[in-house]
Amino acid sequence: MSSGLTWFKSSHSGTEGGACVEIALTPAAVHVRDSKDKTGPDLTFTPAAWADFIAFAQTTRLRRGQSR
């Protein structure tokens, strides 16, 4: 677990408590964790890897006909 980070959920996350992730940003890394398990482990990505993932996710969603 990464302490001292400021975590936040996506603005697209609902309030139902479903499958959400939270992220925390630092200049060198993007940390991702399960919002239901705040004391559990987190994944760490480089900013470039995170940007690639977001671009892929947006492209995939648009190909499936879903809007933002």
Image (cartoon, rainbow, N blue to C red):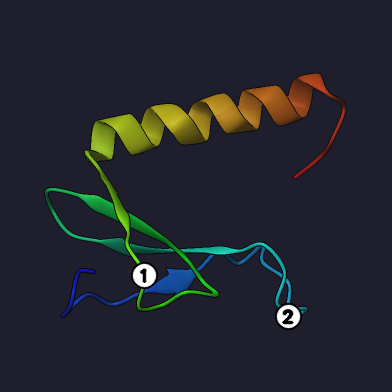
Residue placed at 28% from the left, 51% from the top? 30
32 or 11, which lies in front?
A: 32
Q: Is mark 1 on a helix, strand or loop?
A: loop
Relative to 52, say whether 5 is above or below.
below
| Residue beneath disc 1 | 40
- Identify the amino acid type marked 1: Gly
Of callouts 1 and 2, which one flags the residue occurring earlier in the amino acid sequence? 2
Single out the residue that lies furthest toward the top: 63
- Quadrant where the image shows the N terminus: bottom left
Single out the residue that lies furthest toward the front: 40
Relative to 43, say whether 23 is above or below.
below
CA distance for labels 1 and 2: 21 Å
Residue 35 location in percent, x, y? Answer: 51, 72
Residue placed at 22% from the left, 75% from the top? 5
Looking at the rendering, which quadrant does residue 58 occupy?
top right
Labels 1 and 2 touching (C-beta < 8 A): no
Residue 41 location in percent, x, y? Answer: 32, 62
| Residue beneath disc 2 | 15
Residue placed at 36% from the left, 38% from the top? 50
- Identify the amino acid type marked 2: Thr
19 or 22, which lies in front?
A: 19
Q: Is 32 positioned to the left or the right of 19 in the image?
A: left
Residue 23 location in percent, x, y? Answer: 39, 62
Q: Is 46 positioned to the left or the right of 58 in the image?
A: left
Instruction: Give the class, few, some or many, for how many residues have Cα within 10 Å of label 1's Cα (few <14, many ≥20).
Output: few
Instruction: Give the class, few, some or many, for how many residues have Cα within 10 Å of label 2's Cα (few <14, many ≥20).
Output: few
Q: Is 32 positioned to the left or the right of 31 in the image?
A: right
Single out the residue that lies furthest toward the right: 65
